[in-house]
Image: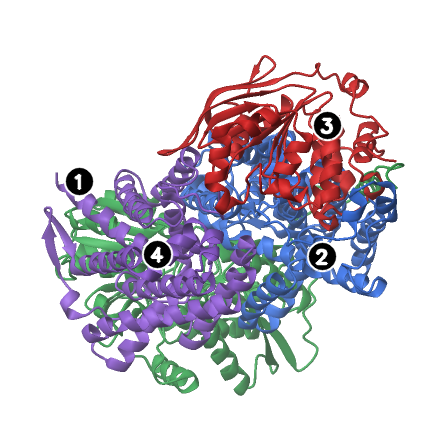
Chain colours: A red, B blue, C green, D purple
Amino acid sequence: MSPQTVDVLGAPQDVATGLAAPVSLVVSGLRVQFGGFVAVSDASFDAHPGEVRFLIGPNGAGKTTCIDAITGLVRGTGSAKLGDDELLGRPVHRTARLGVGRTFQTASVFEEMSVLQNLDIAAGMNRRSAALLRPRRTVEPRIEAAAEQIGLAGSLEQRAGTLSHGQKQWLEIGMLLVQDARVLLLDEPVAGMSHDERTATGTLLQRIAEHRAVVVVEHDMDFMRRFATRVTVLHQGSVISEGSVAHVQADPRVQEVYLGSAATHGADPAEHEGATS
Amino acid sequence: MTGGLGVPSRRNALAGTGALALVLLVVAPLMLSDFRLALLGKFICFAIVAVGIGIAWGRGGMLTLGQGVFFGIGGYAMAMHLKLADAELNGGSGVPDFMLLYGDGTVPGWWEPFRSPLFTLLAVVALPALLATALGLAIFKRRIKGAYFAILSQAMVAAFVVLLVGQQQTTGGTNGLNGFRSFFGYSLSDPANRLTLYYLAAGILVAAVALSAALQRSRFGELLVATRDAEERVRFLGYDPALVKTVAFALAAALAGVAGALFVPIVGIISPADIGVVPSIVFIVGVAVGGRAGLFGPVLGAIGVAWAETSLSEAFPSFWSYFQGALLIAVIALLPGGAASLVDRLRERATSPRRGASSPPAAGAAGTPAPAAAASTPADRPAEEVHP
Amino acid sequence: MLHRNRRLIAVPLAVLTGTLALSSCGAKAGETTAGASGAQSCVDTSGDSVKVGFINSLSGTMAISETTVSESLKMAVDEINAAGGVMGKKLDVVAEDGASEPATFAEKAEKLVRQDCVAAVFGGWTSSSRKAMLPVFETNNSLLFYPVQYEGLESSPNIYYTGATTNQQIIPALDWLKEQGKSKIFLVGSDYVFPRTANKIINAYAKANGMTVVGEEYTPLGSTDFTTIANKVASSGADAVFNTLNGDSNVAFFRQYRSLGLSPETMPVVSVSIAEEEVSGVGVENLVGQYTAWDYYQTLDTPANTKFVADFKAAYGADRVTSDPMEAAYTSVYLWKAMVEKAGSFETDAVNEAADGVSFDAPEGTVVVDGDNNHITKTPRIGQVDSTGLINTVWSAPEPVEPDPYLKSYPWAAGIAG
Amino acid sequence: MDVIGSQLVAGVSIGSVLLLVAIGLSLTFGQMGVINMAHGEFIMAGAYTAYVVQQILGDAGLSLLVALPVAFAVGGALGALLEQLLVRHMYHRPLDTLLATFGVSLVLQQLARDIFGAPAVDVRTPSWLQGNVEVLGTVVPWTRLFILGVVVVAVGGLALLLTTTALGRRIRAVVLNRQLAETSGISTRATDRLTFVIGSGLAGVAGVVLTLVGSTGPTLGTGYIVDAFLVVVAGGIGQIRGAVLAAFGLGLLQAFVELSTTASIAKFLILVIVVAFLQVRPQGLFTVRTRSLA
């Protein structure tokens, strides 16, 4: 069985958990400041269900900081709305409860626990306290489905710490799925993956995006070209270009930014990464 | 098997708990002289504290150097009740003896509720739990953790002791409270009643272990470990780690309170020397030696260390300090999982040649498309830094 | 595996309720008199030796003082054994460490009495250790000999108090201060039962004798910062300080006191917890000329003391000193021997019966047991620290003072004993 | 006001002792996120060093001055030993280090008891430190001024070291971001060890100075350790200025609270105030975003 053949991420499940219909993430005028240093000066972008939104830019452009601000890890001003809910100014766990899920640059799973335990915890945000006090007796259908989706259905009892790097990142995505995140913010989800793994991940993301908003921060330009629906380019804390992959690649400002820093970062969208595909 | 986390399987937990109950409730009373049995009763009190520490520290990562506060609250609550009850015995004045001697001969208002046995029993559990909840929410909401939390909890116990010592007229000062004659109407000088007390303590310890086992196997138990290992991740999954930790901390506090309340009639005294900075760390020592994260490690460690102290210090008083220090250093440095992990390690060596060699499950390799390739290259990167 | 999980908790709970139901058949409080039920004495006097117990803190904070007591106890036992023992039986010592913790004292006392079956126990220092042990001795109806001056207000049929009670130390010291024309007293003490009780007595005494207490300060045990308290003392206008500080705190207090320019001439300090043993630790230079109140000093000129000091130095080193608690401990063993021999029995009740009027020519002079309260007569003495660290008697009560732990013979003390 | 003046002086004098016992701890805690429970015993070792030096040299004045550097060396050596044998192996487990070093403190205390005996030993105060001087209308003992002087020299020296030397820059770099420092070619191993030596050496110096205040016994250090931790925590990790402010703040607080209540209540209130303060500023007075505690 492969992710392509089983669809468990669709409407039935959302209905089952009572989550509202898919909604969009709209960020406008986001600004983050650390002391005197402005990490993000004025970022506006949006992400809608049905599209995979890529957030790219050279190192230090403020991509991860944007995610940090949206998820409440750092304080930002401006606005980030999920549907009608303003996300900024909430504690991290409240933001998460509104349906915002994120991954980290280094896959952050509970290493000591089994895959099943990882997923079960991620699925538990809305459990009542009484349910928390009981042991887990069965594998919930949505967990089983998500495990299927991320290709770990056969490894439910495996300790997460023993998973391969790529598997950990899938597990993390799986956790967002069972968490019923309405918007997924993924920070470099394919870092360190082989080409095949990247392809599988990209396909997975496209499927997820059918019912949820997906934002991907990525350096891998080849990956972006293959799977991005729309792209937002950040540079020094503000948006310099936005649009389809083709549009962004053609934008002279983007080329300038990437060429200017290509020598140090090796992230020229047109030349460097393209050569490997 | 639920896998990982050092949680014993249900069968093992049940067998272990049963064995513990058998030893404490049947074997020990048959084998030990009544003096040694009373000693064991005292160690059982420490073991009940240890079960709580196992939950808070072993499972939750909160190194609490302040369990003496909760132990003390439970102990003093019980001691106050016993003093008041004794004072009413045989048509007494209702004023505890030490207040007549050192105070102004009147019972302060905050003592009065402890005349009620029901209130006292409630207070023994609820007061420590409430205090821990209040402190926990305050501390954990502010994301104070790790070493900061340890130091704060230690400062807390230091403050508590200073307060107790300074209020001699109402707390007995350094003398503490002692000289109890009865326990809920039963004479404490009757050996039959003392035996009952022992059974009570042993029974509560067994119940505490069972509670801890149930907790470890519950979803909450898993969440607690997750919070210990990656607090931020838990937060991003929509949980408030402060709440998770507070619940565990309050549970540990309640267990310490119950232990303190049992300690009072068994040992016959509660004083600041039993609950200060050093006793609070010594509570930890037993847990560390036995194995902090396991189910039985804390219990066996606490009883074992206390037993060793009593028997070794009888023979060589100064040697004990060296031994205790060296034991702590050796266990923490070489065997952080405690004695329990030694057993696991031996068992593992016996069953499988190498830990890392256990191959990823076949289903994962066969059933997935492209990801399958990755499964064969286990990227065993060093464990993520654990925030204690 | 994941399913079918029965409640783990059910089994132990059943066990618990079962055991409770089974075993709750003991005596109700008040039904039996204390001591009667658990007091089957196991003391074995059939052989040619009999066991006695020592209980002193050999570790922890109190080890400083209590090891010396254990040494003089040992010396007394060795002497008695060399002279043929008690009623022809050699004494076997079982020594236990109280570890400076009251709960440990209670535990070890219980062990000595019930496990080792000793005929009598000697030791204890702090009030808290005595209070902790008291129920053990009363429940098992056995004997403790307690050798340290204390706060009084206690008298148990199972404890013999061979140190001074308040009317043999505190009150004589106040009499002496009054005699010296000191009328404004500053009280400094550690925060525990002895200083608090002593100061309660001092306040009552002052009221009745036209003296004023111009300040009363307590510091936590072990406190080493006396900046503020010394400032308060210096600016109080007191003409004497009554010091009930314990142990290490004295060092810090006297250092600070001295560096503020205060001296024995301008504002003498009378200490009741500094004996010869403590002087060197506090520093002779800090104490020279200051006063102490005890019933025994190493410098006493009695034949018994000359021998006691010489023997002690021979046993433990020429540089060692002897002090009041050591002497009281030494005396306690001999008093017990005399009581046992008068009773002709090691039984607690028989010994108690015989106790009244038993006397011993102690290093401090002849002491007599008062069978009413189990204390002994003692001769209060004010001493002054000299430059060698020894304490010389500057005032002595004309005759031994009868013990009065509840201060019944002092009208002004009416409210103190509750 | 007479009283205010005297309590100001008292507060500064309490604060200077607090600062001296805490400054070394603050350094090691900040550098490595490690709580050294044996710090108190290093202080005790310093105090006994003063005693031994005085026994050898005889003259109280000379021996005090000699003891200061010797105690620094003794403390530093103990620190190096501890770091080498224990702390560096447990770098990722700060709480375990806390417990293991508590074990070390038990052993060191008993060692002192066995070597020097349980009773306190007498370290004499030099004649040139006896007596007092009037400051702000208050009589101030020379010993207290001397302690203040030692504190100023120690803290000033440390500040200079951190700001002007290469070692100091390395230490600050590691405190700010250990990984980055490591990748920039700084040997964190060497830096850790040196920091530990300096921090422990300062504990030794504190021990010498404490012989001027209180008694010198095996439990000397335990009396100060909780207070020292509070200073470190209240001041903020790895922050010298934080430790300075916290120490003198707590000292003054203690002096003035004690004036109107008792010493016991004052001590209790101080602890409560620090806990409450950490509610407002969990990272202490001054904050560095350190990797170990962020």
Residue D202 shown left or right of residue A43 in the figure:
left
What kind of element bears circle 3? Answer: helix
Q: Nearer the viewer, mark 4 or mark 1?
A: 4
Whether tag 2 and tag 4 are in contact, CB under 8 A, the answer is: no
The x, y position of residue B228, in whole percent, is 62, 43
In whole angstroms, how far apart are the C-alphas of marks 2 and 4? Answer: 48 Å
In whole angstroms, how far apart are the C-alphas of marks 3 and 4? Answer: 49 Å
The x, y position of residue D90, in whole percent, is 56, 60
Query: Residue D162 or A37: which is nearer the viewer?
Result: A37
What kind of element bears circle 2? Answer: helix
Q: Nearer the viewer, mark 3 or mark 4?
A: 3
- Mark drawn on residue D169: 4
The x, y position of residue B335, in whole percent, is 65, 62
In whole angstroms, how far apart are the C-alphas of marks 3 and 2? Answer: 54 Å
Please tell me in which quadrant of the rendered image residue D130 appears.
bottom left
Please tell me in which quadrant of the rendered image residue B167 appears.
top left
Whether tag 4 and tag 1 are in contact, CB under 8 A, the answer is: no
Type of residue at label 4? Arg
**In the image, is residue A246 above or below residue C413?**
above
At horizontal 62% and vertical 59% (from top left) the residue drawn is: C141
At horizontal 42% and vertical 58% (from top left) the residue drawn is: D222
Q: Nearer the viewer, mark 2 or mark 4?
A: 4
At horizontal 89% and vertical 36% (from top left) the residue drawn is: C4
What kind of element bears circle 1? Answer: helix
- Mark drawn on residue B300: 2
Query: Residue B125 or C148: which is nearer the viewer?
Result: B125
Which chain is mark 2 on? Answer: B
What kind of element bears circle 4? Answer: helix
Q: Which residue is mark 3?
A: A206
Say whether mark 1 and mark 4 are on the same chain: yes
Q: Which residue is mark 1?
A: D4
Q: Nearer the viewer, mark 3 or mark 1?
A: 3
